Amino acid sequence: MGRTGLHHCRLSPFVLIACAFAAAPSPARAEDLADLSLEELANLEVTSVSRRAERLADAPASLFVITGEDIRRSGVTSLPEALRLAPNLEVARVDARQYAISARGFNNSVGNKLLVLIDGRTIYTPLFSGVFWDAQDTLLEDIDRIEVISGPGATQWGANAVNGVINVITRRATGTLGTVAEAGIGNRERGVAARQGFALDGGGAVRVYGKFSDGEHGVRANGAAVPDEWHNGQAGFRGDWGTAASQFTLQGDAYRGSVQQAATGVDTRMSGGNVLARWNRQLAGTDRLQVQAYIDNTTRDVPGSFGERLDTLDLDLQHGFQAIAGHAVTWGGGHRRSYDHVSNSAALAFLPASKTLKWTNAFLQDEITLQEQLRLTVGAKMESNPYTGWEFLPSLRLAWKPESSQLVWSALSRAVRAPSRLDRELFLPGQPFLLAGGPDFRSETAKVFELGYRAQPSPRLSYSVTGFYAIYDHLRTIEPAAPGTFILGNKMEGRTKGIETWGTYQVLSYWRLSAGALFLTEDLRLRADSGDATGVAAAGNDPKRQFTLRSSLDLSSEQQLDIMARHVGELPNPRVAAYTAIDARFGWRFRRDLEFSATAQNMFDRRHPEFGAAASRLEIERGIFLRLKWSP
């Protein structure tokens, strides 16, 4: 079906919802519904909380896991869209390709308090300590899980892990043998992808993949088209060798893409590549050693604004051992070196244009067994950055298991958002400048208290509830310097508090319901000596509440129906009205090696805005995407 035909398709959402909640399909095994039962999910090993493998049910943090099966059944086509499945994240689409993603507030299109990793590789840019989401991609088919922590993770992961950590973990090559090829088309985007996995003589495996996708332009509230079409291609590989006692991984990716600029009509171009090597060694007893290194190159050219070439080398070592009875110690350190070159323009400049940036860290964490069901984790990281030197990042976590199916935990942490090049070295030309980075700009700080409860009272029900209270200081402001000129300062402070909760209920062996809710209160204010005329709006634009509900239903052993409803409350400044979106996916494996799926997004809503000022923002249209997957 061509683009015009798809655009005028009429899909009845009432029929799909009726099927989800009223149909009486033939019973199917729980394994047909998802890869993991609730009990298996509780036993899933996660690594993002303590940088060592532990059961999800035992992890003392506000941690939500998006499984590979969740991603497949959602029908999403990009990594940012997959993150909507996490109820502890705020995800707002800004335009055709860019997103604002955060946890626990402070959300904006250049968010800087969320650390994101793909297979242990940090993907933020030192330009603004955030992520260019239009350049982040991987083959969704090969994702094992995405571990989403809301709350500070600085002791484990360092500066910028202030409000959360997103850790994307792909499957080992040994788990992706064989061929997968798929093609999809819709009214908003289209794409093709393929992957081939090979078993190697003598053990081990290698996979290679490639994908290409492009998307349509966005629209404004009046229906006018905005020229921001995009194209992206990516290829990569991963190889895994060794035994359970000694494992080696080598992987890499290369990509190239473009996004048309709405303002000028010319293309923003981005490209890059990376290679990562990791060695894991199981030592005597439970002792373990991991050594990791990667190189990364990214290039971005925004005509009329700036260009950047960033080359990064990162080295990391981690060692875990049993010091004495009742003490599980993890320690390590790392060093990152980046060479950042910016091509300045008449619109903005980074001075100096070229700079070598260095970060060094060392951390120590001791998990102490106080009683059989009571654990105390004491940890600290020392990390240096190019602007403020060494920062101290401590944390305390207490975990109590009154029963095997319950976990009560609390945490007290300090995290910082270290200055970026934007904070210190940005200049907007003027007489002599309009806006400049602050030469004395310091780290933003957060002191956070958390209290959580996780339980699985029955094989059919599991849930998690977390309350948090955070004190922020030295947040970024725009201060007057001289008549007509401004510099960046640190004269905002405040507090946030809230509750985040989610749960899953296995209604029947072939029907599962999941729900989540987030409640947030922010109280930010300028210090008395601040002259910032913009107020606190620049810190972020966040809803006070948001809700999600997902239904996963096996209509038969070959057919699946998944529906997700999400409600996002009003954004205050600039105001964006609250909205409710309902997405659905129908999947049909009509042959052993062929699966067809149809995904509808924003089924009841022709289009709605999610972020930005009314005069310039885009609106998210209703979308339909058809996909055919071949896996012999």
Image (cartoon, helix red, strand yellow):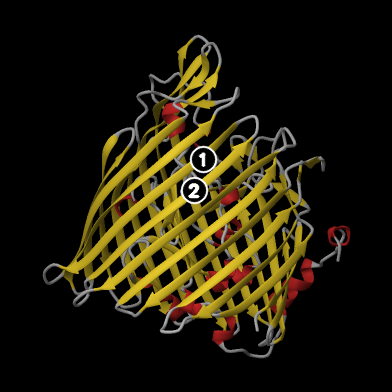
Q: In the rendered image, which residue does mark 1 sit on?
A: 309
From this viewpoint, is residue 369 visible? no
Residue in the foreground of this view, choosing between 88 and 247: 247
Neighbours of disc 1 within 10 Å: few (<14), some (14-19), many (20+): some
Residue beneath the point at 68% across and 57% down: 581
Q: Secondary structure at mark 1?
A: strand
Residue type at tag 2? Asn
Q: In the rendered image, which residue does mark 2 sit on?
A: 297
The vertical placement of 603 against 93, above or below, is: below
Residue in the foreground of this view, choosing between 171 and 111: 171
Q: Residue furthest front?
A: 201
The vertical placement of 5 against 341, above or below, is: below
Residue in the foreground of this view, choosing between 427 and 27: 427
Residue beneath the point at 42% across and 40% down: 339
Please identify the quarter of the rendering in which residue 193 is found: bottom right
Residue type at tag 1? Arg
Disc with the residue nearer the chain's start (2 vs 1) = 2
Neighbours of disc 2 within 10 Å: few (<14), some (14-19), many (20+): some
The vertical placement of 164 against 196, above or below, is: above
If the image is split into quadrants, where does the C terminus sit? bottom right
Assess whether mark 1 and mark 2 are in contact (beta carbons under 8 angstroms).
yes
Q: Residue 389 placed where, x, y %? A: 27, 35
Q: Residue 55 placed where, x, y %? A: 35, 73
Q: Residue 620 placed where, x, y %? A: 71, 50
Residue beneath the point at 29% across and 78% down: 245
Q: Secondary structure at mark 2?
A: strand
Please identify the quarter of the rendering in which residue 20 is found: bottom right
